[in-house]
Image (spheres, rainbow, N blue to C red):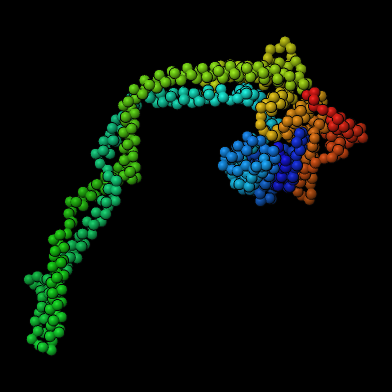
Amino acid sequence: MLKVLEIENIAVIEKAAVQFDTGLNVLTGETGAGKSIVVDAINAILGERTSRELVRHGAPQAVVRAFFEGVDPAVQAVIGNLGLEPEADGSLVLYRRISAEGKSSCKINGAPCTVTMLRAVGNALVNIHGQHDSQTLLDPEAHVHFVDMLAESDRTLTAYQSVFHQFLSVRRRLKALTADEEDKENKLDLLNYQIKELEDADIQIGETERLNARRTELSEAEAVRAALQDVAYTMGGDEEFSGVCGYLRALAAKTAPYSSLQSISEQLYALCDSAETCKDDAEQKLETLDADPEEQAQIEERLDQLYRLSLKYGATEQEMLDKLDEMRAQREEILFADRELETLSKSYDDLLLQVQAAAENLTGERKQVAAKLEKEVCRELAYLDMPGIRFVVDFGKGKLSSIGQDTVQFLISTNPGEPPKPLAKIASGGELSRIMLAIKTILAHKDTVGTLIFDEIDTGVSGRASQKIGLKLRAVAEDTQVICVTHSAQIASLAGAHFLIQKQVKGERTYTQVQRLDFDGRARELARIMGGLEITPALLSTAEEMLRTAREGSSQWV
């Protein structure tokens, strides 16, 4: 159950902490006081969509914290499945911050989480019925879901969906295989051309890198050849130029006759030998230098080919080879399509029979549940001052879909002898509210959520009917925590905990406060609801009597 709700800077609520009780809790206040804001805050902490408009004007951020206790094992399992550690004592803390820029951050038991994770936990914790939810009763497409929620288990629906998804897969494949034959031939021609182009190219892994390296070598070879030729010529000379070797040899010969120049002569002869060696090395390298212009042209042509292929089939050799394998597989798929088509056609026929049988089983189970729903809704409505109502769950047969073949629509007859008609054509706003409450009451026994929230469930009803709604809510609250936003004094009088939402203006700012009322405070609030601005002694006395009667009474007759 929801134990404490803390709100900071949500709309006109600067700061509030609401400590809820087990049983029936009600929120009352004048129109515009901020009752809906409390529900908005609860929606936010449950992971519903929010906006920066929710943040109080001038505040940097809004924060909502919710403290739960006695969390159901099913909720604990949801938390565990999200990779988070549930608390051993069954407590749970949800946190959400909304910045003024609209950004959101969430936590579950102090651990950061996504809004999706928060919503998954929230859906297992709280069920909110808003004042506009009754409109779902006007949408026949939603009616089948109410029937399914009442089912003892979802195994039949799960079994149907399993075979239905297999059926869809086979049907999609068949549709693809039975595409226009001309289109298939065109695709095959294109695949053959592309496959041949890649196969003829004979692409090798790492080939581009190797070719680029060889191209660099060849481009450098010309410069190397020129340098070696310069070395050989400078050192060896020619017929007109004796070269470094000739000059050194001549100098050595000039200094050799003189004993005083012996050391210089020896150095010159040594330099001459080094120069000769350098010349020989340069000439030898020139003879072995590999710089074939034809090879360079071939490399350029191959690199250009690989580049053009990369634009069509993939940036790297591996990607191009993967594309080749993919296209070969596509070609094989087309070539053997006829054989696969025959196999799939048989599977389609078999699965169609299975889907139809599963759909019939689902229909049969739903009709059994629907018969029970009809009786229970009529019983609940009779208590809620709608006696003589005939509630019918009408079945039709539609196309096979993910939820079966059933079209389900709720019909009612409000007057004996009148045929049942769709809710949208007959039911008033107050009747819709009571029908929804009846359904929610029935489904509450099937739901594992610990908290039910009703936002103005009393819309369109008053007097005796409102009293009955209050008694029904109190009866539901014996098993599940109920929080109800209401304008009804009859409903408010039956609550175990009563909170007043009050708006005040201080300076130029509006502030909303949430105050838990004692007996006297409740009496004054009930008198205000019944009488408006002027609270007379008679109204106050009536309100006190309503509270005493509610306190002494019981929901045992509900």
The quadrant in which the N terminus is found is top right
Residue 326, compared with residue 363, is above or below; it is: below
Task: Give residue 74's quadrant in the image.
Answer: top right
Please tell me whether residue 508 is drawn above or below residue 168 in the rendered image: below
Q: Nearer the viewer, residue 379 or 203?
A: 379
Quarter of the view holding residue 65: top right
Quadrant position of the C terminus in the picture: top right
Residue at the spot 92% in from the left edge and 35% down from the top edge: 537
In the image, what residue occupies the spot 84% across and 34% down?
526
Q: Based on the displayed image, in which of its 4 quarters is residue 222 positioned? A: bottom left
- Residue at the (70%, 34%) spot, across then down: 451
- How far from the left and from the top, in percent, is residue 52? 64, 45
Query: Foreground: 153 or 160?
Result: 153
Residue drawn 74% across the image and 29% down it: 476
Q: Is residue 225 left or right of residue 5?
A: left
Residue 323 image point, x, y percent: 33, 38
- Residue 335's x, y, as percent? 31, 26
Give left or right: position of 549 versus 436: right
| Residue 104 visible in this rendered orientation of the protein | no
Q: Eyeballing the image, is 270 above or below 429?
A: below
Residue 328 visible? The answer is yes
Name, please, the residue furthest toward the right. 537
Direction from residue 261 to residue 111 in the image, left or right: right
